[in-house]
Image (spheres, rainbow, N blue to C red):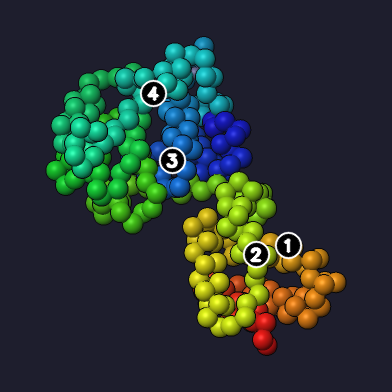
Amino acid sequence: MFSNDLQTSYPEATRFLTNAVVKDRLANSYIFIGKDSNDILKITKNLAKALNCSRDLPRQVSTPWQALTAPCEQCINCKWIERNEHPQAFIIVSPDPESKKEQIKVDNIRELLNTLNTTSECFRVIYFPVSGLQFLPPDSCNLLLKTVEETPEKTIFIFANQSRNDILGTILSRSQIIYITKKYNSVAEIINTNVKNEFSENIADCFSKNIVDSLEKAKQTSELIQKNEIGLKDYLTNLAVENYNNLKYKNQKQYCRLYKSVSEAHTKLKAFMQPKIIIEDLFLSLLNSQ
Ligand SMILES: [Zn+2]
């Protein structure tokens, strides 16, 4: 159902949505949480196309055949959706640029509801590219919630946001959350694509002179890992790979200490200790004065 690119980068999210379509169990409302808003848009469009692609078969949604094949990108529905011009199958609701606070105005929601009240051949995907609290003021939200609760046939709502923290509780409780997080093949790939300088520096310079320095490094590392959604196990592997060969002949004392510290961190990780504590222990054990 999804393009190869999206399936490779987002195996979990695409598998989950494909399953929902194949089993005819799409929820009325989804919250897509992820950092890459372009990719979230791509996934949403791909879904809208898959549900509306007309190809040479009659337009039938939710048949396994259609659900498992990527959309044709050639038919009028696919083309319109791609250009954000489909009046029924893919409707984007964004904050009103005229409004001072850049909010989604209640009038926009009314207009949307009018559109939804008309019958349509299409499977409608209503997309909110920014749906934090600040964008959905209470009056817009109340009106919207009623519709989400009694979603018209063949309609789904998709709210995109960077985190789940600033989404209104009433929307959260009525929606299914899907994390749109990228799968990388290696930590090296993450570093190359996202955070090259910041991260390489952190890994190459893991030893410290004093406790304050150690704790500062631990803090930065925790933040870096969280910000870039890197698994602690992957981080440790990369720390080892980057430094072992380098240190093995240059500084055996440091090499042994790093080996011991990384192994200990792995053991703690397996014992489900909190990542923050594991990282602090790790950097404290990498003090040069020891
Ligand atoms: Zn098509």
- Per the model, the C-alpha gap separating discs 3 and 4 is 15 Å
Residue at x 78% of width, y 81% of height: 253
- Per the model, the C-alpha gap separating discs 3 and 2 is 28 Å
In this figure, what is the number of numbered marks? Answer: 4
Question: Residue flagged by tag 3: what amino acid is it?
Answer: Ser
Q: Is residue 174 visible?
A: no
- Where, quadrant-wise, is the N terminus in this rendering? top right
Question: Of the residues under marks 2 and 4, which one precedes in the sequence?
Answer: 4
Disc 3 vs disc 4: Cβ atoms closer than 8 Å?
no
Question: Residue flagged by tag 2: what amino acid is it?
Answer: Ile
Report the residue marked by disc 4: 84
Give SS at disc 2: helix
Question: Residue flagged by tag 1: what amino acid is it?
Answer: Glu
Report the residue marked by disc 3: 37
Give SS at disc 4: loop
Question: Of the residues under marks 3 and 1, which one precedes in the sequence?
Answer: 3
Give coordinates of residue 7: x percent, y percent. 58, 38
Question: Of the residues under marks 4 and 1, which one precedes in the sequence?
Answer: 4
Question: Of the residues under marks 2 and 1, which one precedes in the sequence?
Answer: 2
Residue count near mark 1 (Cα–Cα under 10 Å), binned few <14, some 14–19, many ≥20: some
| Furthest-right residue in this view | 249
Report the residue marked by disc 2: 203
Q: Is mark 1 within 8 Å of ligand 1?
A: no
Disc 2 vs disc 4: Cβ atoms closer than 8 Å?
no
Disc 3 vs disc 2: Cβ atoms closer than 8 Å?
no
With 119 as the anchor, is 218 left or right in this view? Answer: right
Question: Of the residues under marks 3 and 4, which one precedes in the sequence?
Answer: 3
Report the residue marked by disc 1: 242
- Per the model, the C-alpha gap separating discs 3 and 1 is 31 Å
